[in-house]
Structures are given as structure tokens and as C-alpha cells.
Image: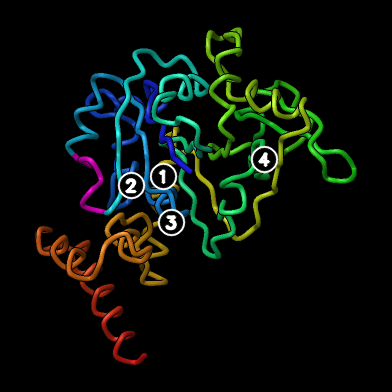
Amino acid sequence: MKGIILAGGKGSRLYPLTQLISKQLQAVYDKPMIYYPLTTLMDNGIKDICLISSSEDLPLYEKLLKNGNQWGINIEYREQPEPNGIAESFIIAESFIGSDNVCLILGDNIFYDANYSLKITKQKNGEGALIYAYYVNNPSNYGVVEFDEFGKAISLEEKPENPKSNYAIPGYYIYDKHVVEIAKQVKPSDRGELEITDVNKSYLIKGQLSVEKVQKNVIWFDTGTISNLQKASCLMQRIEENDGLKVGCPEKSAFNNKYINKEIFQSLIKKIPECDYRDYLVKELISSVNKEIII
């Protein structure tokens, strides 16, 4: 399975922060926002990743993430000239996707999944699509899924004025190889975008859409607003202070998932200047060595 990170949009709701730097490069506590969706893919076993952004911002992502080889993964880059909608991602990345299934995550969506219940292994080679449903108090701000009395998804709406449920669809989607052709059939909505909801509707009509309600232990932030950006930062700080855990470290994800060995992990740490981030990775390295001794 391949992965796509859509790091597009103008970030107008984060003005004036986004006057100088892309939304997905803003700091979420002590790391760039883009680290969080990247490590979500890495922790799900996805090593081939395509990042889509504007021509203005792509060089910044390439400078930060490079080609991913330092973390044992592959990162390619594609341009989205205008923010024409989430579904356009599949058309832009058609050559990258090829005949593989694909997981799309939005660059401003952050998940804290303590029990790893968002694992997508079962969908890797399957047919159809898998999306998630997350209970929110303000569903009008999101794509919304309606369930029948048996918990089966029966309708999807994009930012409805009168939502039929409180279940929003987070920016984390898994599709089979047919998603590119489906995206090509989508017509622009009233706001001029190729809506991801229309892609999901196509799978729903065919009876090929699976919808899973997110477990309560999973925390999701759409950090496209100042309020949510601040809340996400505060949560990451609280997790570190209370649990001693840094979320969203690509070096740690690469090492824990065995994309890189201990020697490469150590070499990456040596390149980082003296800081809390470096100290945390050193502790992770020492912990792994101690575990080897115990075993």
C-alpha cells in the first residue's frame, strides 16, 4: 500500500500565521505539523509516500523531509497548482499510485492513537474503501456520515447545514486501485472543488464502502483553525509531561518499525543539535539497548 499526504490549501483560517509559512509546517508543540501525518503512515507500515502541495511550498517540504531515505522510506513530491479539492490528489498522484491500494491522510489532521486501533493492515490488499467516523459536536464543519439502526452507513454529506448525524469523517482514507478512475469522474461542487465525499459516495453506491467508528481512545484534531492548533499543541505537551512520550517523531517511527537499524538511528541522533528532541531520541536508543540485554 502507498500513502499520500495532501499538504495543500491556503490556510486562510490560520491567518496571519500562514502569511510566511505553509499551514502544515506550523509548529504543533515541538515539531512541524507535517511530522504527525507522516508518522501515522509510517506506523501503519507505509513506506512509499507522495506529498502533494503548492509549487511555492514544495521546496520547503523537500528541504525538511528530503527523499525519506534517512528514515528508510521513500518520499516523492507532486504539485497541486490550485486547491481544487481533496479528490484531485488521486489524479495528481496517478503515476505514483499505479496499481496499488492507497491511504490518503490530510496534512493538517493529527491522530493520537494510544492503542493503535487505526491500523489498516486488513485493508491493504482489499477491494473497496475504508473511512472512519468520529463523533463531534460541530458536524456541519466536516463531511458527515449517517448510519441506520444497525450501524450501517447509509448516506454521506459534505459540510451540511442540517447534518443527519454527529459523526464526522476524519482526513484519513483507504482506497483500492480504482480510486483514480473514480476521482476522474467527480464533478466540481458548488464551491468549485473535487470533493472527497463524492468519491466516498461512489463506493457507497456500489456497496464497497466500509465505515468504522473511531474508538474513544483515539484523539483527532483538524488543526486548520487557531483553536485546534493550540489544543493539539497543548495535548502533545501534556502527553510528553505526563507519559514521557513524544508523538510524531519520524526517527523513532523508523527505528521502532525496523525501517532503519540501531547504527543508522544512532547516526541520525548525532546529527541533531543539543536539545530536548535529541535527548528524547537518546533515551529511546538506550531503552532499546537495555531491552536487548534483558532478552
Residue 10 included in the magenta stretch of the image: no
Q: Earlier in the sequence, mark 4 or mark 3?
A: 3
Residue 66 included in the magenta stretch of the image: yes
- Give the magenta-colored segment's residue range: 64-71
> In front: mark 3 or mark 1?
3
Q: Is residue 1 above or below residue 82?
A: below
**Tag 2 residue:** 35
Q: Earlier in the sequence, mark 3 or mark 1?
A: 1
> Disc 3 to disc 1, how far (Cα)?
10 Å
**Which residue type does callout 1 highlight?**
Pro
Per the rendering, the mark at residue 142 is none
**Tag 4 residue:** 137
Q: Confirm or deny contact between disc 2 and disc 1 (CB under 8 A).
A: yes
> In front: mark 1 or mark 4?
1
**Tag 3 residue:** 43
Question: What secondary structure is found at the residue carrying circle 1?
Answer: helix
**Tag 1 residue:** 37
**Which residue type does callout 4 highlight?**
Asn
Q: Confirm or deny contact between disc 3 and disc 1 (CB under 8 A).
A: no
Q: Nearer the viewer, residue 157 or 166?
A: 157
Quarter-of-image position of residue 260: bottom left
Q: Nearer the viewer, residue 15 or 41?
A: 41
Magenta stretch, main secondary structure, is: helix
Furthest residue in direction right, as rendered: 149
Q: Residues within 10 Å of mark 2 (few under 14, many from 20)?
A: many
Q: How many marks?
A: 4
Q: Residues within 10 Å of mark 1 (few under 14, many from 20)?
A: many
